Image (cartoon, rainbow, N blue to C red):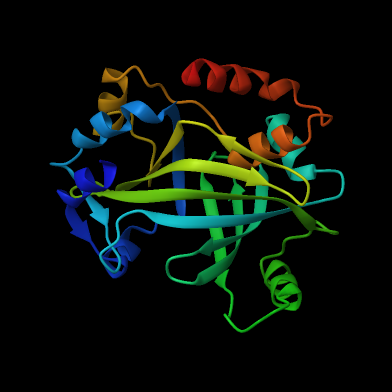
Amino acid sequence: MLTEILRDFESISLAEIAKVALLKRVDTKFVLNQNILNDIVKDWKQHFSVLEINNKVIFQYKTHYFDTPDHQFYFDHQRGKIRRSKVRIREYLDSNQAYFEIKSKNMKRQTDKKRMLLPRNVTDASRLTKEFLEKNSFEVPDLQASINNQFKRFTLVNRTEEERLTIDFDIQFYNDKNKISLENIAIIELKQKEFDRTSLVFETLKKHNVRPTGFSKYCYGLAALNPDLKQNYLLPKFRLLKKLTA
């Protein structure tokens, strides 16, 4: 059903969407029950185009996160530290590409993402990633593999405003011991050059009783897979997910 709805959208190519890359941006997230996603998306048909590659509009992703042995990135987020970072490898399974990424928040709460395309034939990318971290003056030592996730995503681009949306669903988290799923949950992320609450996105989601809420897939997944990890700050998020899936 969702694929059929998206097929009715005007499409945009990967080359065209690169013009709205917004590597420096303001992000706003919304968490919702996946059952209402179809109705929400229909409301954007006249204003947004959908990314289409090789006749596909929904794509599969994997993410491999890195953190320090004492989970510095996780706790920076939980403590509400404004300047914070994530380090990850993002795999685009449909195009067989992978990027090593540093995603940081600055004092203006803007997101700044730097990334490097990883060569397909490299079996050990540690040297390349180390050089990339050093090139970008990233001084956190002793990074190690943390958790992984996989999900489906489609991307919408506003035809007149400098903003785009990513919508993630069928989200799973796993490590070498456990695997969990975010059952029936979708996460919408609005990416804007500057924060603008007058965006049609806010209006549409408010109509469906969906409000903005901070949500880190990494922090939730790490806490869910490691229940002994301190997670007091995440308890409202756990309650929200329980309410949305009830």
Q: Position of residue 80 (x, y in %)?
A: 68, 30
- Which one is in front, 77 or 118? 118
Q: Residue at x 20, y 43 (%)?
A: 5
Task: Name the image quarter holding residue 102.
Answer: bottom right
- Which one is in front, 141 or 45? 45
Q: Residue at x 58, y 37 (%)?
A: 181
Q: Position of residue 201 (x, y in %)?
A: 29, 33
Instruction: Classify 132 as above or below 11.
Output: below
| Whether residue 79 can be seen here | yes
Compared across the picture, whether 120 is left or right of 81 comes to left
Instruction: Classify 227 as above or below 73.
Output: above
Q: Position of residue 35 (x, y in %)?
A: 35, 27
Q: Position of residue 83 (x, y in %)?
A: 66, 42
How many numbered discs?
0
| Whether residue 82 can be seen here | no
Instruction: Classify 63 as above or below 83.
Output: below
Q: Residue at x 52, y 47 (%)?
A: 111
Task: Name the image quarter holding residue 220.
Answer: top right
Compared across the picture, whether 24 is left or right of 54 comes to right
| Quadrant including the N terminus | top left
Q: Residue at x 46, y 31 (%)?
A: 184
Compared across the picture, whether 138 is left or right of 56 comes to right
